[in-house]
Image: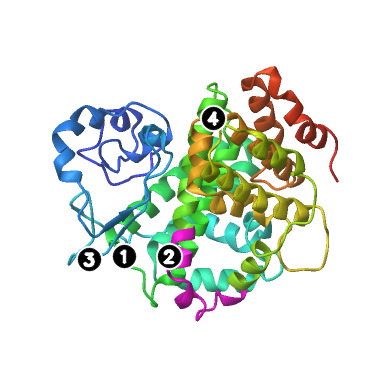
Amino acid sequence: MLRRSHKKSRDGCLQCKRRHVKCDENRPRCRLCILSDRKCSFASLSTGDASSQSMSPGDTRWTPPAGVQDSTPLEPIVLVNREPRNRRTINDRPLDVDEPINLLHTELLVHALLNDDMFSFAIGFEKFHRAGLAIGFEKALKAPYLMHQVLAFAACHLAHLNPERSIYYRHQAVEMQTRAVSIFNAAQVQVDQSNCVPILLFSSMLGQHLLADTLARRDPGGIDSFITHYVQCVEMHRGIYTIATSAWSMLMETELEPILSMSKSLTSRQPNGEDTAQVSALVESIDSMGEEEKQACRTAIHYLQIGLDAAQVEDNSPISRYQMICEWTMLVPPLFTELLASKRPVALIVLAHYAVLLHYGRHLWQVGDSGRYILHIIGTYLETGWDHWLEYPRERVLQDVE
């Protein structure tokens, strides 16, 4: 059988050459090596290149916390606040964004158009899926980075639906997503009225894709591996939140205004349930925690309870009952993320209650049994003295939740 032709990467890393895949030549580690957790031959050359990768004063980068950078599954998005170069490049090579489409692209595009549950995290999407997609694809035709991310997410969904071909589709998802991020970074966009919609759509879908990948991970490293990737996911979502808040006035003058208003109507609610009462009491009882750390935990618990309230009430609101599964990762304070990264027991207990919210949404393809898995690795990691504080999430997760 003839192999499909492709443009070779003559200066790619040794690992990609041995696997006969196209390398994006990103340094200090190429994208495919990062996503497949392989050692990249570029890494040994990174010391001499460090000065060429320094940030200019106008750059704003979404970077992971110290200690987790090498395991990030995605390239940090770069928003460069300076005049764009005359032509777009990737690693100083000309970037061809006009590559011809093929049958795979067509398959992924049709799949995105016809499958409502692909966007089940999205606010209100199940109520106006076609209209929402019309907005997305209209913008994607003018923003190649958004189109590539749509196709990447479609490939991710197809991998879930077709386990027998999951390796193939996941490989396509990695390639499409790598391309999307590379195009976005090479474009060096500055957010303004003309591009705020495609940038927010791209960032949101990238965040949803990363969360789906993170919740699906079952690495041998257990809690250490999961926390590393989940913290990175939270950092990415915080970048999305930064974009949305900084461009809020512009976005509210666009066709996204109804969706953003509905999202705000959920996050501005007051919690009324008692699901998090026990973990709230735990936070207040720990004398060794500073007030700022306690406030960070209170904020995380506040939004978590709003999500649990919504998940347990079925009404006619166009707001998704499970919206907070995704938005919680965007709204938790940076200090709470630091507590998670250091695996502080109180933060892990809060995360165990997030597992309850995941369990409510276990029928969503992005979630599955992740609630049970997260609760298991937390319970395995914590000493038995913390079992009392895990009683409520265990009770909710280990029983059938309707």
Q: Which callout, 2 or 4, points to the residue nearer the camera?
A: 4
Q: How far is mark 3 from mark 4, CA to CA?
A: 38 Å
Q: Does the magenta stretch include residue 363?
A: no
Residue 225 x %, y %: 51, 28
Image quarter (top left, top right, bottom left or bottom right) of the N terminus:
top left
The numbered mark, 1 or 4, whose residue comes first in the sequence reads 1
Q: Mark 1 points at which residue?
A: 189
Three-letter amino acid code of the residue under disc 1:
Val
Q: Name the residue under label 2.
A: 199
Q: In this view, does 42 lie to the left or right of 222?
A: left
Three-letter amino acid code of the residue under disc 2:
Ile
Q: Does the magenta stretch include residue 247?
A: yes
Q: How far is mark 2 from mark 3, CA to CA?
A: 17 Å
Q: Is residue 344 left or right of residue 387?
A: left
Residue 246 x %, y %: 43, 67
Residue 300 x %, y %: 61, 48
Residue ranking furthest to the top: 384
Q: Which callout, 3 or 1, points to the residue nearer the camera?
A: 3
CA neighbours of label 1 inside 10 A, class few (<14), some (14 to 19), many (20+): some
Disc 2 vs disc 1: Cβ atoms closer than 8 Å?
A: yes
Q: Name the residue under label 3.
A: 82
Residue ranking furthest to the front: 287
Three-letter amino acid code of the residue under disc 3:
Arg
Q: Which callout, 3 or 4, points to the residue nearer the camera?
A: 4
Residue ranking furthest to the bottom: 253
The numbered mark, 2 or 3, whose residue comes first in the sequence reads 3
The magenta region covers 241-258
Q: How far is mark 3 from mark 1, CA to CA?
A: 9 Å
Which residue occupies the foreground of this view, 5 or 10?
A: 10
Which numbered marker is on residue 343? 4
